[in-house]
Image (spheres, grey):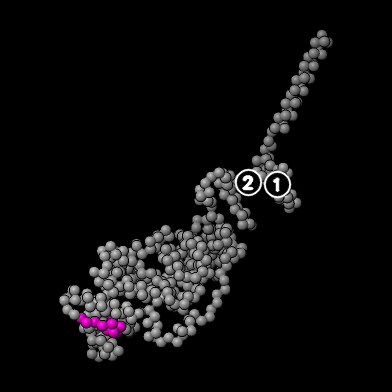
Amino acid sequence: MSLMEDKHCGAICEERKEFARFVEQDNMAAISTSTFYTRRRALTISKAEEVLTSICDRDDSDISDSESEGENCDAYDCDTEEYTDASSDSDSEDPKAHTSQRRILWRTAISAPENAVPDQETGCIFSEVRCDFSPLDYYKQYVKDDMLVEMAEKTNQRIHKDRGIAAKISAQEVKQFLGCSMLMGVIGYPRIRFFWKKGMAVSAIADTMPRDRFFQIRSNLCCQTEDDVTDKDKKLQRLWKVAPFVEMVRQGCLSLERPNCFCVDEQIIPFSGRCPVKQYVPNKPHPVGLKNFVLAGKDGLIYDFRTYKGKDTFPDLSLGVSGNSVLALVETVPSCSTLYIHRWFTSSSLMDELVKKDIFATGTLVKNRLPKEVHFTNDKDFVKQSRGTSEEVIRFDKKLLAQSGLIKGLF
């Protein structure tokens, strides 16, 4: 009996030892729940130095697994300039696809953008030659005598073809016609015939050219005839009758000495006659006429322009008519210049393109064009602040900054 009890006790002891051995192995292989649910411990300065030293020595055996956990998580530290994205765990993916999935991150601005606007040097914006120009010299810089001769010839050809008569219009008469037209625009009579009417006549106009001769030139003046332009070119260039004259004036604008501060805006050239590209833009001093996109300086001079001729005005419409009109106008702007634009033109995509050209742009922006990652204080709370309050949000690359300000109670 005692022998059987001893064997039984021995079997129990062996089972207990086997169970204890199993529990010990299981505990060694188990993963603590704190690994997943506790906050990651922050790296101390000494520990960080040890990690960096190990990496430099190409020995990562001392880097613990707990420090490398979660390296693929989507995070952004607002106190640093580093950013990560959720797709960083797939190194084998296409780089283009990887870039397209990256989020554009913004944060509250704590410093100026990386490419700060340089100090603007004011100084004389005119060359020494132009400082002594007379009004006629300024006029000749835009309108060349060769063009006047060409216009007189083409106008005579048109009159002879349409009416079978020889008008014999000279280049001098074309120059006088242009001068009279400019003076009429300054005086501003409601009817052109008033400039020759008794009691209202303007001698500078009435004594220069007879009324009927003026209207004859006005009705037939052109730079090209229909025989000079193909049907295809007529469709592409809807202002083909005056295209050479417009280009001549533009070349005069391009010949001006460039400052370092510009603005882009649209203007309406008043015109009430028949024209396929005539526009109506409300809230303008002259709402009816030809739309013109203008690059101007703070001196009021126009340095470049593009006349709107329909959807084919700008071949590339990736940024729309507003954005591509700005890109077309800044082609002649020197780098490191400052540009101010109207809210109709402003967009984050346009700003990125201008940064690539080393042009520092500033523009007002409507709210529906703000990047979706940009968040300002809601209007209800913001209007309660004192006048002059503003807040800024800057992009992670420090190349674009958005600002909201309270001026006279309005945004």
**Hey, which residue is sitting farthest right in the picture?**
2
202 or 336: nearer the viewer = 336
Residue 51 in sight: no
At 36% from the left and 75% from the top, the residue drawn is 248
Residue 310 circle label: none
Q: Which residues are magenta?
A: 167-176
**Left or right of 390 on screen, residue 232:** left
For marks 2 and 1, the one nearer the N-term is: 1
At 80% from the left and 13% from the top, the residue drawn is 7
**Tag in front: 2 or 1:** 1
At 40% from the left and 76% from the top, the residue drawn is 252
Q: Position of residue 138 (x, y in %)?
A: 40, 83
**Left or right of 227 on screen, residue 388:** right
Mark 1: secondary structure = loop
Could you tell me the amino acid type at mark 2? Answer: Glu
Dot 1 alpha-carbon crowd within 10 angstroms: few under 14, some 14 to 19, many 20 or more: few
Q: Quadrant of residue 215?
A: bottom left
**Hey, which residue is sitting farthest left in the picture?**
164
Dot 2 alpha-carbon crowd within 10 angstroms: few under 14, some 14 to 19, many 20 or more: few
